[in-house]
Amino acid sequence: MIELSILLTVAIASFLLAIVPGPSVTLIVANSLRAGARAGLLNVAGTSFGVFTMIVIVAAGLETVVSLMGEAFFWIKLAGAAYLVWMGVKLLRSDGSFGADGAVQAPKIGYFWQGFFVVWSNPKALFFIGAFIPQFVDLSHGTFLQTIVLGSVFLGVAAICDSIYAITAGQAGSMLSRKRVRIAEVASGLFLIGGGLWLATVRQN
């Protein structure tokens, strides 16, 4: 049984990570601005399905790693913490831009599958899930179910945040100003750096 404090920590961390625009959010905002919120929400459904498949892969792989490496799994978690710090530094150096969102064209395969393939065309998403979720897994219990549950929390929060982006862009794109995006990037970047450093030290026990 995962403690409520862990679930809340993952939920808060997921929110701070999800509000930062990445390739998926850029796509969702671009399609919502051009074709309305429905297009963006279909993108959200596709990206959510893609992330869920990644979570299952991480869950299966994590259980295998733990069974084979035992205590050596600590070093994998340490590498994950370092990755979070690196992501935080990148966010602090970002400029709050959504990128060339006006260049996104209507997909022939449908907005759902466009979202799915955008997630899978970005290997950083899989690496990030593999670095973030294991930090909260208790090795004294089965890791597969824990990873699925924690990953589902991340997925749910991300889907809500992405849906808000889609609806906001579909109705009033001016609300998504670069200044506001930059504030979110700085806050999340600092959180990632601080969280990564904390995980690297505290979870050595």
Image (spheres, rainbow, N blue to C red):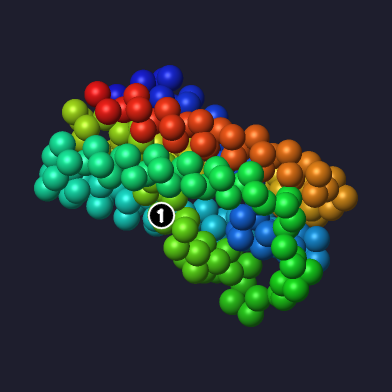
Instruction: Return the x and y of residue 127 as percentages of the image width and height.
Output: 41, 54
Q: Tell me which residue sits at (32%, 39%) in the image.
A: 78
Instruction: Return the x and y of residue 144 as percentages of the image width and height.
Output: 26, 42
Element at label 1: helix
Q: Tell me if residue 62 can be seen.
A: yes
Left or right, 73 with reference to 87: left
The furthest residue to the bottom: 108
Instruction: Name which quarter of the figure residue 77 lies in.
Output: top left
Closer to the camera, 178 or 171?
178
Instruction: Return the x and y of residue 86 as percentages of the image width and height.
Output: 49, 47
Q: Which residue is mark 1?
A: 127
Left or right, 78 with reference to 127: left
Left or right, 10 with reference to 94: left
- Amino acid at the residue labelled 1: Phe
Q: Where, quadrant-wise, is the C terminus in this rendering?
A: top left
Instruction: Name which quarter of the figure residue 126 lies in.
Output: bottom left
